[in-house]
Image (cartoon, coloured by chain):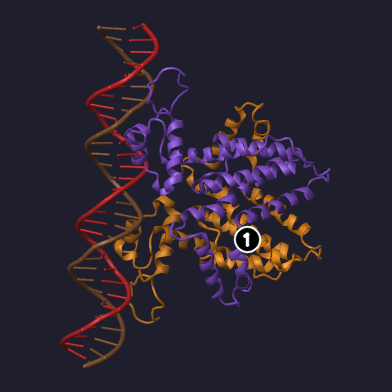
Chain colours: A orange, B purple, C red, D brown
Amino acid sequence: MPRTRGRAPTGGRADALSREIIVGAAVALLDERGERGLTFRLLAKQLNTGPGALYWHVANKDELVALAADQVLGHAFAAVPRLEEGAGAGLRALAIAVFDALDRHPWAASHVTAPATLANALRLLDRIGTLVARTGLPAERHFAVSTAISYYITGVSAQIIAPRSALDSTTSRDAFLTQTAERWEELDPADYPFLTRTTTDLRDHDDRDQFTTGLDLLLNGLNTTADPRPPA
Amino acid sequence: MPRTRGRAPTGGRADALSREIIVGAAVALLDERGERGLTFRLLAKQLNTGPGALYWHVANKDELVALAADQVLGHAFAAVPRLEEGAGAGLRALAIAVFDALDRHPWAASHVTAPATLANALRLLDRIGTLVARTGLPAERHFAVSTAISYYITGVSAQIIAPRSALDSTTSRDAFLTQTAERWEELDPADYPFLTRTTTDLRDHDDRDQFTTGLDLLLNGLNTTADPRPPA
DNA sequence: ATTACTTATGGAACGCCGATCCATATGGAT
DNA sequence: ATCCATATGGATCGGCGTTCCATAAGTAAT
């Protein structure tokens, strides 16, 4: 299975396939029809080829979707300004950029995985690590803290965003929340003291606020854990 | 599609199916053969019935897997002592219990979803909320903070644990980490200043420590954000 | 040009899956 | 004994990921 090699920049036919072209078309298809809408047959048809040809450039569907998700992660970097801020502010901007990118491509949320092997996942973790290294934190904690922040960003984004892509397109987010709130109201307050008095918060909440709430708690904890240096 | 109703506790035949029996068998199959190993055909065979019969009790595969994951979440509650501790300690114990339960059933990690609708997801969020309400936090922030913590627990657990279930069973975790570390070492230090000097940390890290590192940052931030009450 | 070889393509076929259909069984109520 | 809602399970459908392989296209040497 000899993935596409460096390939001489010249030559090849005009309509040549490539891993990049395939992944790009996959992203478009995923955006348009969701995860279940991506099939090798349909993808091949859009590229005017057969399903078999795709396997020359891509090992299998898992790899294809992983590459597509990594490309979405790459979009996030375009939005965030090149570093050069305080660590806290830089981490916050980075996190929000990732959240927003995944928000625009909900199918990708559940496919950005932790152990960084793909190009943009590597970039993300490196940027986080570089920012963390600027805090007063002892060096031996940099790795654990950086990965923790990386896990928060991708993991919590996935929790918030992924369910939306599973939502029946006929049911709106509002309708779903209202319906869920109603179910919470019917619970026994003796068993669920908290939920039964929190239904209006559920109905009115904003997804992005929820993400930043936890993020700020985390970064806050980072400040007080680190040596109190001038909060850049 | 008339799910199983209350059903009179008496009667029925001895070998009667039920949603609980089906979900239980699904969990066993998922534990044994992973997510792709669960099929309606195989599940039906194990229960001495046909695939069609299962659909009387369960709407489709998505629902079945969701119910199975929720059952795993239920296991977590068995391990954690009934509340009655300080908020911080209680939240920590709860979080770790969930992590450990998912650790034992890796396939479930990517299926515990945020908007709580299933039984045990509801229980989890309610417990978190009850503990959060004991802090000095103003009431209007209880919902956002509770859901943030809930998102952290399930989302970050998923990030850490889920990749493991995708790992080729012939490749050990150690081998995978060593291999990934090698790839990091080959990166250009100019582009990846952090990763290239962090490879040994990657190789030696402990997954559970990573989970608790972020968790403690979060809870730490919670303490300093809340009115400074006696840290229970 | 011709040849020989690697790289790449694309359509057909394989095996399996989720889901549906429907003829049949079961057991409580009348 | 009869009836009917509840429940079962085997056959079947359409579609999927993947593999196979005959063939095309491009490259390099003669």
Compared across the picture, whether B18 is left or right of C8 comes to right
What residue is drawn where x is 65% and y is 39%? B80
Count of numbered tags: 1
What residue is drawn where x is 51% and y is 68%? B179
Residue B144 can be seen in this image: no
In this rendering, the answer to whether D30 lies above or below B184 is below
In this rendering, the answer to whether B9 lies above or below A226 is above
Q: Secondary structure beneath disc 1? A: helix
Compared across the picture, whether B1 is left or right of A230 comes to left
In this rendering, the answer to whether A11 lies above or below B59 is below
Position of residue A119 measured from the top left corner of the image (x, y, whole percent): 52, 68
In this rendering, the answer to whether A7 lies above or below A42 is below
Judging by the rendered image, the residue that carries numbered circle 1 is A147
Position of residue A195 measured from the top left corner of the image (x, y, whole percent): 65, 34
Q: Quadrant of the N terminus of chain A?
A: bottom left
Position of residue A208 measured from the top left corner of the image (x, y, whole percent): 63, 50
Label 1 lies in what chain? A
Position of residue B134 measured from the top left corner of the image (x, y, whole percent): 76, 38
Please, what is the three-letter code of the amino acid marked with disc 1?
Thr
The crowd level at tag 1 (other Cα within 10 Å; few <14, some 14-19, many 20+) is many
Which of the pair B77/B112 is nearer the observer? B77
Which quarter of the figure has residue B198?
bottom right
What residue is drawn where x is 63% and y is 49%? B152
Which of the pair D20/A193 is nearer the observer? D20
Residue B68 can be seen in this image: yes
Which quarter of the figure has residue B41?
top left
Q: Quadrant of the C terminus of chain A?
A: bottom right
